[in-house]
Image (tube, grey):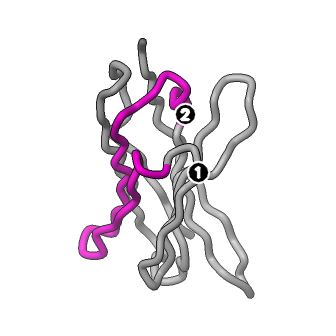
Amino acid sequence: QVQLVESGGGLVQAGGSLRLSCAASGSIFSINAMGWYRQAPGKQRELVAVIISGGGTNCADSVKGRFTISRDNAKNTVYLQMNSLKTEDTAVYYCNAGVPPPAAMDYWGKGTLVTVSS
């Protein structure tokens, strides 16, 4: 089992910055990728950024150049630095941890709300 706890959400004006944190605990040795997803009201959950065990990262086109995903292995924590925020970035942001086969599990945090005002 893996437990994920997000923090860092809040209200920010357009153009501002926030940093989200996701602290992982439990069977973290089994994780091969961690990512951030978001879900805006009335929309489907979408991938924002992912970081794999080897350190490679990828971001959605909509956030490239503005958001950066990183991790601190000593703290078992993944971060999402969000700069130049736009009103369309308003959403609940969820942390995800993926465990490969044979377990093939997906773990989710409870989410943290980011609201960007104009």
**What residue is drawn where x is 42% and y is 15%?**
117
Q: Which residues are magenta?
A: 64-92
**Image location (x, y in percent) of residue 59:** 53, 57
**Image location (x, y in percent) of residue 23:** 37, 58
Q: Secondary structure at mark 1?
A: loop
What residue type is disc 2 on?
Answer: Val
Which is more toward the observer, 28 or 115? 115
**Image location (x, y in percent) of residue 16:** 30, 28
Query: Which is nearer the N-term, disc 2 or disc 1?
Result: 1
Q: Is residue 97 above or below residue 13?
A: below
Q: Quadrant of the C terminus?
A: top left
In this rendering, position of residue 44 left or right of residue 14: right
Q: Residue furthest left?
A: 74
What residue type is disc 1 on?
Answer: Asp
Q: Quadrant of the N terminus?
A: bottom right
**Image location (x, y in percent) of residue 89:** 51, 31
Residue highlighted by disc 2? 92
Distance between the alpha carbons at the discs numbered 2 and 1: 18 Å
Which of discs 2 and 1 lies nearer the camera? The answer is 1
In this rendering, position of residue 116 left or right of residue 98: left
Label 1 neighbourhood size at 10 Å, few (<14), some (14-19), many (20+)?
A: few
Residue highlighted by disc 1? 61
